[in-house]
Image (cartoon, coloured by chain):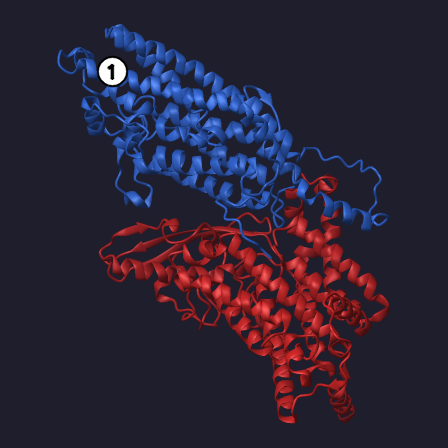
Amino acid sequence: MNYGKYPIILFLLTLLFGCVDSTEDQDIPEENSDRKEMLKFWVEEMIIPSYSEFEQDLQNMVISADQFVNNPTESNLQALRNTWVQAYVSWQHVELFEVGPAEKYTLRNFYNIYPTNVSGIETNISSSTLNLNLPSTYDQQGFPALDYLINGVAEEDIKILEFYTDSEKGENRRAYLNTLVTRMELLLNQVTSDWNGPAKEEFISKTGLDIGSSTASMVNAYVLYYERHVRSGKFGIPSGATLASSGTPNPEKIEAYYKQDISLLLAKTAHQAFTDFFNGNANGKQGPSLKTYLVAIGAKDPSTGILLSEYITEQLAVISNLLNGLSENLYQQIITDNDSMIQVYQEMQKAVRILKVDMTSAMSITITYTDNDGD
Amino acid sequence: MVTNLKTRFSSYLNQTSSPAALVVFRMMFGLLMFLSLLRFWLKGWIHQLYIAPKHHFSYYGFEWVQPLGQYTYLLFLVGMIAALFIGIGLYYRWAALLFFLSFTYIELMDKTTYLNHYYFISLLSFLLIFLPANAYFSIDAWRKPSLNSSKIPSWCTDSIKLMVIILYFFAGLAKLNSDWLFLALPMKIWLPAKNDLPLIGNLLNETWVAYLFSWIGCIYDLSIGFLLLYTPTRKLAYTSVIVFHLLTSILFPIGMFPYIMIGTALIFFSQDFHLRIIHKIGGIMHASSSFLNPQRSFSYSNNLNSLFIGLLILFFTIQILLPFRYLLYPGELFWTEEGYRFSWRVMLMEKMGSATFLAKGENGEIKEVDNKEFLTPQQEKMMATQPDMILEFAHILQNHFEKTGIENPQIYVDSYVSLNGRIGKALIDPKIDLSEEKESFAPKNWILKFEDEIKGF
């Protein structure tokens, strides 16, 4: 709330007193456009609970990684793989929340930059001066690096185990695995403790739509996430649908390239989390959301009467349906039928535009602001 | 009838009145311009808007006006000093000329920073060059008592009033369109964005409030100039000027403009009113009574008088015709924006877009452009909805790719624009190679049809 303008408003109200009808207006809209309530629901029912759940899953991964590092057996490897999959899926529920603390610590950069850099990882393993805060190391850590380390260092499990039991390098390799996992835990801890501290109230209190306001920051982060990390990252780049890849498919650039058969699951989970956020769907609990906000402010096309919220929901549903028709292994999908991948990309591109232009215009939010006068 | 009008006009031109209103305006203008430029500087906008960007968008015919690197600060400094000199009336005419040139140069440096109120300031400072606003209560008049006058030609003060009336009236005329009046757009979009304001926040969610704001805004703009001119309604009109502009200052990010208008509208008040202000300031400064009460009447030489009057008639004729130039273009004005600027179309529409450019080389190579590599977010935002800027950016890209080794690059744009809440669609024909198109005043036939109608001006 902008209390700096309080005196001007009071002055104006005094001047206008008698002109403005001050009787109670009974015309309460069906949906509420109170951004404070929306922010409160976002942070209390969506962001923080999603992080807690992810924290739990990550914790399980940390434990099994610890067991594996201390005792690199086949069953411990399998256990680590299972918890890694669970944590990676769970991550898809929080990756979209790169605002506030997560933005401050740029969590995504350390968690999910792929394809991972194998030669970088090899160098790191034998390096004594490792600094994983450097931007050049983003692709040498997080889930994609773990993917390589537990699924990709060799074809057969026996060979993978030998990788860690090697008398010469095994110890360093186990240490690196341990470093990555502990680091993820530490970074997440910073984010969650910030959210549970003053960041929460701060987020709820910035109710405007200008630069730095919570709604604008969230919408910016939300749309950027979908554009770069879902549309391009999971589909556009691997399928070669983005022009940057000039039409050449790069199946090895899929998410979870070494595990492969969870790549669709990750993408579907991300798309579902994205959709749930739009709809205000928090584990079955329904709350104020972008959708209800758009309804409340009456966002619709003045020539066709189409409700913007419906238009967005439909487009997200089109994408869901397409995702259901894909192979669980997106690598195979690209090899056998890349057109379906490209089609997903194109529909996601439509969604990006609707969100980036139509939704932000309807809400009076600008994507990537500079603060300057308008007229 | 015609001769009658002619004699009435020439007798009007011979009328004289106190310079007090023009002098108060001069002081107010000088001070506010100094503060505006200072504010611009302190906010870091000189760097952000004129030094940091790698490329700039030029006005057609003014491509030679470019930022001056670090010397851009000097340009602002010149403008600020000139503004102060205008305010105190020292070397007034040179100061007015210098201010006009420096300020206008600044505005011409990058089209993406265009604001109607900057244009208004350029025009006011242009007028000031020809007006004897230093003929009373100025340092010039103090140093040269033969300049100090109690009378100046009435047309001098009136030309500022006319400029203000034109601004408001055309701003009102532009609001006479179906989106504004019958759909309350874009108010219906903009007001709920401020629903977290104390006290009035909840009201801004109401549709009827959006209609009320639209209609009041339109009626206000159309009538306020005349209500200020007419003595019995002046006080009420001025009160509404204050209310209206303060309200807009709360709701919209329009910087100094409300304060400039509140100050400028004072010019409509009577001679006595302005004389009282001047005597009050003079009293504080212990100015002599002879300085405050000069006896002479200011006039230009006959030749200069005819020249200035001829110039002003030409100036105002252009001012009145310019906003109608859009009629020479086909298609929906809000969509094509051909003839949109320099027409007092202020806060009139909600338009947002995205534009993705492709460069295709002769050997079949295709590059997708990351706009951010070339433009600032502000530039990108403005460019994405305005066809002339899209073309200019295409030419910037053409140049760039020629230099980086793509021979004869073809430039295509995939654009998507939403206007007043309409679901977005392509603004520019994606099959047109923009590297082949030239900027001109001719209609741009590669702008796609709006396929809806916004009736009215």
In the image, is B308 to the left or to the right of A236? right
* Amino acid type of the residue that numbered disc 1 sits on in the rendered structure: Ala
Q: Quadrant of the N terminus of chain B?
A: bottom right
Place residue B153 in its image quadrant.
bottom right
Residue under label 1: A175
Give how far across and how far down residue B258 sits, in percent: 67, 58
Q: Is mark 1 on a helix, strand or loop?
A: helix
Q: Which residue is drawn at 25% across and 57% down?
A: B404
Tell me which chain appears red. Answer: B
Q: How many marks?
A: 1
Give how far across and how far down residue A357 sits, in percent: 51, 46
Taking B347 as reference, is B79 above or below it? Answer: below
Taking B209 as reference, is B382 above or below it? Answer: below
Q: Which residue is drawn at 36% across and 21% down?
A: A184
Determine the chain carrying the residue at label 1: A
Q: Residue at x 60, y 57 (%)?
A: A375
Colour of chain A, in one word, is blue
Taking B114 as reference, is B62 above or below it? Answer: below
Q: Which residue is drawn at 47% across and 16% down?
A: A53
Taking B247 as reference, is A217 above or below it? Answer: above
Give how far across and how far down residue A18 sits, in percent: 86, 48
The answer to whether any part of residue B330 appears in the image is no
Camera-side residue of A42 and A270: A42
Q: Quadrant of the C terminus of chain B?
A: bottom right
The answer to whether any part of residue B102 appears in the image is yes
Give how far across and how far down residue B364 sits, in percent: 24, 54
Q: Residue furthest left?
A: A168
**Crowd tier of the residue under label 1, counting other residues whose Cα lies within 10 Å: few below 14, some 14–19, many 20 or above:** some
